[in-house]
Image (cartoon, helix red, strand yellow):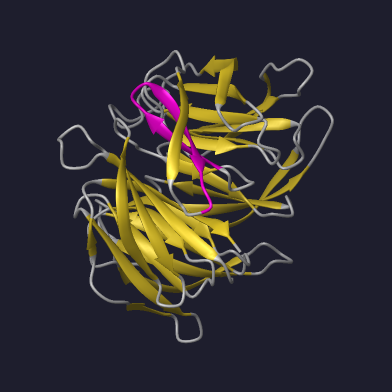
Amino acid sequence: MKGKYMAYVGSYSYNGQAKGITVYDVDVEEGRFIPRCEVEVDNASYVIASNDGKTLYSIADEGVVSFRIHENGAITRLNSANIKGMRGCHLSTDADDKYIFVSGYHDGKSTVLRLNEDGSVGEIVTGVYHKGLGSVAERNFRPHVSCSRRTPDGKFIMVADLGIDQVKIYRFNEHDEEMVLVDALHCELESAPKCFRFSNDGRFFYLISELKNVIDVFTYETGERQPKIEKIQTVFTAGPKQSQLTAACSMRMSNDETHLFCGNAGDNSVTVYERDKNTGLLEALCCLPISGSYPKDICVFPDDKHIASINHESDSITFFTVDYKKGLLVMNGKELKVNEPNSCVIVKVSN
């Protein structure tokens, strides 16, 4: 936990109220962000850091923008890369930071780009457009790719599409560098599978569904042609009194992977689950309000004792101390105002 940490929050900039990325110093002990500066990015809708913590990536109107992260937490632009499609909504890198995966909500495209040794974004390697029709007009009537990740074994790319209620599985290797469809998880109609995350050991993954408001827990085993995947649990993302407007919208795991957090729009709450690392199963501890509107992302502090809720519609970040024993989220100081925040990442910058 010792060391210096920074937080980077991506915001929409089209209305002139924000520049794109807001840079914060992180007070880990107090569980707070301290504003430092803003950096220009056209509509930073999603931000991530490379696994080595040296590079920051952001969705932007022009595609993907990369920044060098310096030891003092400052960021300087490296380059930007066009994805030859409509603007993306989600980013991920693989374990070795060789590729970056861009999900396209608007055009149903998953794009893979190469990453250069200095962290800058290289050329497009491959990409696929999803086809087909969903079952709900507008919301998921056509393909909307919302999450693309390389599997921990490095053999496949899994792509969640909330428009056609599927998670498609593509074989991918560094020799051919092509996405070859080998399988698909067919989710319940009108469930809208939005995002998934793997456990560090690669044995489990967690899939959040935006319209069905559930998290499905799956076991994962690698295979030659396709992975072996089995659903072992389904849990609700909000309390029993959730309204028709409730939409599960964000999910993060604690750093020690003993807990999982889920943000719910409409309901404007965060649900905390206890996670059994051996079985992968979840048990709900609490579902409590976030004192804001539309928790589009959740940020877990390095000590796992605090969280920040990134509240898109109320233009705010609210901070909470997590009491796991009592099942409570205790608000930690005043909200921070930031215009239309979308996504947040905390990065360790020095020891």
Image quarter where the C terminus lies is bottom right
Q: Is 321 situated above or below 249? A: below
Residue 253 place in picture, x, y as percent: 55, 60
Residue 39 place in picture, x, y as percent: 32, 40
Task: Work out which residue is located at the far bottom of the displayed protein and give it.
Answer: 326
Which of 206/148 is in front?
A: 148
User: In this rendering, would 323 be left or right of 317?
Assistant: right
User: In this rendering, would 239 be left or right of 300?
Assistant: left
Q: Is 269 situated above or below 62? A: below
User: In this rendering, would 331 be left or right of 163?
Assistant: left
Which of 148/238 is in front?
A: 148
Which of 93/222 is in front?
A: 93
Q: Quadrant of residue 20?
A: top left
Which of 244/180 is in front?
A: 180
Residue occupying the point 45% across, 57% down: 6
Residue occupying the point 59% across, 64% down: 255
Residue 131 place in picture, x, y as percent: 48, 16
Magenta segment includes 136: no
Residue stretch in magenta: 55-71
Q: Quadrant of residue 276?
A: bottom right
Q: Is 122 situated above or below 268? A: above
Residue 273 place in picture, x, y as percent: 51, 69
Majority secondary structure of the magenta segment? strand
Residue occupying the point 66% across, 30% down: 117
